[in-house]
Amino acid sequence: MIYVTRKEHFNAAHRLFNPAWSEEKNQEVFGPCANNNWHGHNFELIVTVKGKPDPETGFVIDLKVLGNLVKEMIVDKVDHKNLNLDVDFMQGKMASCEIFVTEIWNILAPAIAEAAPEAKLHYIKLVETPKNFVEYYGE
């Protein structure tokens, strides 16, 4: 099995808050991430696809194709946006990295399968800060 990876960067703002809770409880649970005026991050998105290389091309997936999928389906929709307000696939959802990465997976997995039928999305890593990141394997 071969694993190929594409890395992208984007900037986005969000706010962690539960509308069913009081302002005090949101501050207690989420701290500065519950700021009424949002806060932002320089995100890094790492997408890994696995499969066996095509005997004709030698590719598991053409990295240019993978890059275009990630850019068009994710980065172009979230870069310099407010995840809570501006991103269609995050509407009505908690804008935590855990939820965000699962929504990214739900978009990319079928697109990758269509673009490279012998390949499969294996792993996504979403880096929020140098100290905080989430990893998701679709489970």
Image (cartoon, rainbow, N blue to C red):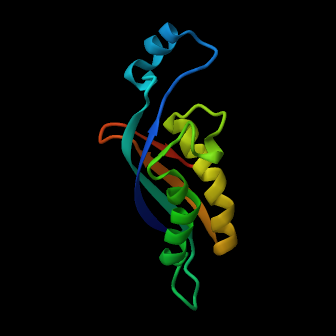
> Which part of the image, by quadrant, shows the C terminus?
top right
Q: Position of residue 74 (x, y in %)?
A: 55, 57
Q: Position of residue 41 (x, y in %)?
A: 37, 41
Q: Evaluate whether residue 138 shows in this view.
A: no
Compare residues 11 and 99 and report the one nearer the observer. Answer: 11
Up-down relation of residue 91 to residue 66 (above or below): above
Q: Residue furthest front?
A: 37
Q: Position of residue 23 (x, y in %)?
A: 51, 11
Residue 116: name its quadrant.
bottom right
> For this view, does 90 lie left or right of residue 125?
right
**Could you tell me how many numbered marks the image carries?**
0
Q: Residue at x 41, y 53 (%)?
A: 10
Q: Position of residue 1 (x, y in %)?
A: 53, 69
Up-down relation of residue 138 to residue 4 (above or below): above
Q: Evaluate whether residue 133 shows in this view.
A: yes
Up-down relation of residue 106 to residue 65 (above or below): above
Compare residues 82 and 94 and report the one nearer the observer. Answer: 82
Q: Residue furthest left?
A: 130
Compare residues 28 and 82 and report the one nearer the observer. Answer: 82
Q: Residue at x 66, y 51 (%)?
A: 106
